[in-house]
Image (cartoon, rainbow, N blue to C red):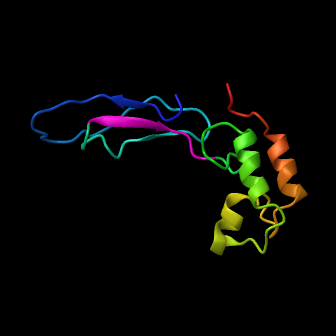
Amino acid sequence: MYGDTFDILDWNTLSGMFDIENLPSPPDVQYWDTSNLYVTGENTFVVPCLNWDMNCDGCTNLADYSKLALHWLDGPCSEENWFCDGSDLDKSGTVDYGDIEILIDHWLQGCQ
């Protein structure tokens, strides 16, 4: 369901709004993006990008490791540079072994 969009409404002329939107509750940190409901008639199932899924594809794998490797030993990492483009996973200020440990702890998570 990651990123799936559901077209639930179609109309020629939009008139009125729902009082209540009752959607099934997704698990964990996932949520429904209903911002396009009255624009395109669509709801999208969203899974926010997790810290260790650096390319936000829903799978922690070699693509994420490659991004971390590009920033290896970079620093100082801070909010100003988005913690070295998201590679300083533990926010220690440097892309180092602590970040590799986090990546390993979540290796292949979300992959099918």
Task: Indicate the position of residue 11 as horizontal and vertical percent values.
Answer: 15, 32
Q: Position of residue 67 (x, y in %)?
A: 71, 52
42 falls in the magenta region = yes
- Percent x, y of residue 69: 79, 54
Task: Pick out the residue farthest to the right.
Answer: 97
Quarter placement of the C terminus: top right
Residue 86's image quarter? bottom right
Identify the residue at image location x=60%, y=45%: 56
- Residue in the foreground of this view, choosing between 17 and 1: 1
Where residue 43 sits, quadrant-wise, is: top left
- Locate residue 111 relative to residue 74 in the image: left or right: left
Looking at the image, the residue that sits furthest to the left is 13
Residue 38 image position (x, y, % from top left):
24, 42
Q: Residue at x 72, y 39 (%)?
A: 60
Location of residue 85 with respect to 54 vertically, above or below:
below
Magenta residues, start to end: 41-49
Vertically, is 73 above or below 106?
A: below
| Nearer the observer, 68 or 107 | 68
